[in-house]
Amino acid sequence: MKQIEWQVHARQRLVERGINIHLIRKALLAPDQVIFHRRQKIIHKRYYDMKREKEYLLRLFIEETSEKWIINSVYRTSKISKYWRVDL
C-alpha cells in the first residue's frame, strides 16, 4: 500500500468531521468513482453509516505519485446525487 501524506487542512477536516481513517484507506484502495480535475483526483466512496442510519458519500481530493497519496481535503456529504457523476 502507498504511503498516505496529509495536508494540514485535510487532517483538520478528518478530525473535525469524525471520519474514520479506515474508511479513507478503503476509498483509496477501492474507490467507487474517480474524477480527474486539474492536477488532482476526486475520489468518491459511498457508504452506509449504521449509527446515523443514512447513506453518505465520502469525497477525497488527492494528488497521487508512484509512492504516495497526498490528501488535500476530505469530507462526507449526504447529497450524493449532487456530486455523483453518471456520465463517467
Image (spheres, helix red, strand yellow):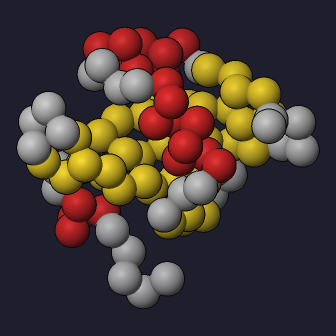
**Residue 5: % across, % down:** 70, 23
Residue 32 appears in view: yes
**Residue 86: % across, % down:** 37, 82
Q: How many marks?
A: 0
Indicate left or right for 79 with 60 as reference: left
Q: Check the image and report above or below for 60 versus 16.
A: below
Indicate left or right for 1 with 19 as reference: right
Q: Examine the image and state in which quarter residue 35 appears.
A: bottom right
- Front residue (pair 31, 77): 31
- Identify the residue shown where x is 33% and y is 68%: 84
Q: Examine the image and state in which quarter residue 26 appears.
A: top right
Q: Examine the image and state in which quarter residue 75 appears.
A: top left
- Front residue (pair 30, 4): 30
- Identify the residue shown where x is 21% and y is 68%: 81
In this view, which residue lies farthest toward the bottom? 87
The quadrant in which the N terminus is found is: top right
Indicate left or right for 8 with 40 as reference: left
**Residue 59: % across, % down:** 41, 46
Residue 9 appears in view: no
Q: Check the image and report above or below for 65 versus 11.
A: below
- Identify the residue shown where x is 40% and y is 25%: 20
- Front residue (pair 61, 53): 53
In this view, which residue lies farthest toward the left? 53
Indicate left or right for 48 with 3 as reference: left
**Residue 85: % across, % down:** 38, 75
In this view, which residue lies farthest toward the right? 66
- Identify the residue shown where x is 10% and y is 36%: 52
